[in-house]
Each structure stands twice: as C-alpha cells, then as structure tokens.
Amino acid sequence: MKAMCIDENRNFVWRDVGACECHDEFDVKLKVEACAINRADLMQRAGIYAPPEGWPLWPGLECAGEVLEAPAGGRFKPGDKVCALLGGGGYAEEVVVPEGMCIPVPKGFEIWEAAGIPEVYATAYLNLKLVGEIKKGETFFINGGEGGLGVACIQLAKHVFGTKVIAQVASDENGEFCRKIGADIVVNRFKDDLVEVLNANPVDVAVDPVGGPLMGKCIAGMNMLGRWISLASMAGPETTIDVNLLWRKNLRIIGSTLRRRSPEEKTQILQGLVDEVWPAFEARKFAPFIHKVMPIAEVTEAQAILERGENRGKVVLLLH
C-alpha cells in the first residue's frame, strides 16, 4: 500500500510502505477513504511531535472509510463504514486500528464529514466532560474558536452541555461564524481586551491550545473552582501566575492530551462520545464544519491552510 510520508527535507512523498497487516485478534483493518488534518500533523512534519510507539511514522490522527477486516463476533464486519481515532498513519490507503477506536459513521453523514469527527470531537468531549467536569449553566471559554477543535468545543458546550460560551477568534468574520454555531460572546484577539472580557464574564472551564503570556492573567479572573485546561502553547510556553489565587479560589490548571492516552482510555472516550453526541449528529442539530475537501495529492497546500490560520473548522483529504 502507499502512504504520504515525510522525507528528510520535511516534504511529503507518496510512496509504497509495504502491506498493512492486523497485529492481533482485536484489530480492524480499514480502507481509508478520507482523513482530516490536525495541528499535531504540522508539528510532526516539523519534527517536534513524534507518533506514539507502535503507530506508523506518517501523519494522520483520524480517518473514515470501509472495514476490510474485523474481529470475528466483534462490533463491525467487512463493508461497514466507520471513522477511527488513530495514534498516527491516517494519510495512507489503509490503516490498522484497535476495534475500540473505531466508531460508526453517524447516519446520514458523508464519509468526508465523518473523517472530521474522531480527533476533535473526542478531544472536545474528553476535556469538557471527563477532564473539565463541565456542568449545565457554567461559563466556558475556548481560545481559538474558529478551528476544528474550537468548533467542536463550542457545539458540545452549547448544545450538549448547556453552558454559556466565550470564544476568542482571529477576526470579526470568524467571530460572526462562531456566534452562528453557538458562541454567546466573541473576542477578537487583535482588537479586544481578552482579560477585560473574562473578568466581566468569569469562566468555570477553559480549553486553551494557545497559552502564552496572557494565560496567567486570564486564569486570575476565573470563578471559584475554575478548571483551566492547557492543550498546547501556540503563543509561547511561558506565563506568570499568582499562585495565591490557586488556593484562594481552589483553581485547577490541568495539562491534557488525547494522543498519549491508552487505547483503553480512548475506547471509553469514544463510547461516551457516541452515547452523548451521536443523537445530536443524526438529528442534524450540528455537524463537523468542513472548511475544505482536497485530494491527498494536495496535502502540502492543505496543511498550509492551517499554518496560515485560514480555516474555519476542518480541512479534509480525500483518497478515493
């Protein structure tokens, strides 16, 4: 089979990588029809985010396609359409994944829509429900509301968990987009004072892939028992925090990642996602917002869309 590999010059090369084989009786083998791009893929291409042990060296954290092989007596059979959460390897014609990390394509969804579900919606569900322990009526903040993860967090926080939603975005146009999908308050990072907005609207749960110098000032304005969840540091790894506020307000600052969790943990997360979110998907209360669908041969330009910050929602690559 062929996969989109990264060469020594950090360029993509579509080349033969050998046969794709199931490793044990609990594996599912998929024919990949579509895969979605995530920022972790960009980090991997830059050489700063290696895949977990046991996963392919080429990128791809989520895909959708057709089951080719499945465990006897398992949940899936050859011919089923599924989407899958991966530790890597989605930019390829085929992929092998533990059965528990496969979930059915929601009824009525196109395969390219389904490819944009597993990584961002599992990340959103993990951090809102399991890590953030979000409750109805609380106030939620997402830093980067227009991206794939931001869209998923806004949709789940508003339409599944019933919270007030604040989103920081990169433009007024992106702000209007986020309002349409459920944000109550939007903050333009280039024009508005984020600290002032959050002080006026104290946050209970925050999901933050940005970090940087403002992070400490934003945490200071949280509600009692606030939970600030750090996923990455796109604005830089350093900030200043008044640690006295942590015990005065009983605040929690939590580092969280999905990729490094075990298959067993990911199986639990995905099952919760299916139980709580699939009914809303299949009723079309909301869906992944797909910014653009492109052939996998255009992967370099597809990643550049994320690098330039142009996307609203997901960029998806088609293989078939």
Image: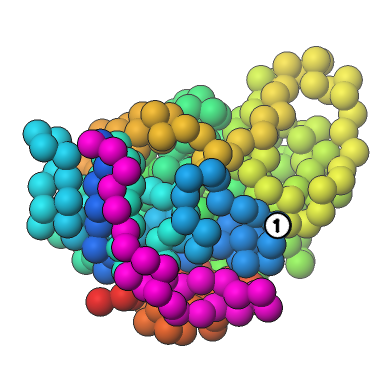
The residue under the point 71% across, 42% down is 198
Q: Callout 1, which amino acid? A: Ile
Q: Nearer the viewer, residue 203 or 252?
A: 252
Answer whether residue 166 is magenta in the image. Answer: no
Q: Position of residue 2 (x, y in %)?
A: 37, 73
Q: Is residue 191 visible?
A: yes
Q: Position of residue 309 (x, y in %)?
A: 62, 72
Q: Nearer the viewer, residue 27 or 154?
A: 27
The residue under the point 66% across, 20% down is 225
Q: Is disc 1 placed on a helix, strand or loop? A: loop
Tell me: residue 274, above or below residue 184. above
The residue under the point 69% across, 62% down is 47
Q: Nearer the viewer, residue 191 or 320?
A: 320
The residue under the point 54% across, 44% down is 53
Q: Nearer the viewer, residue 299 or 13?
A: 13
Q: Quadrant of residue 292?
A: bottom left
Q: What residue sits right under mark 1 in the picture?
A: 48
Q: Which quadrant of the figure contains the C terminus?
A: bottom left
Q: Quadrant of residue 188?
A: bottom right
Q: Quadrant of residue 18?
A: bottom left
Report the magenta residues as a range: 1-25
The answer to whether residue 17 is left or right of residue 79 is right
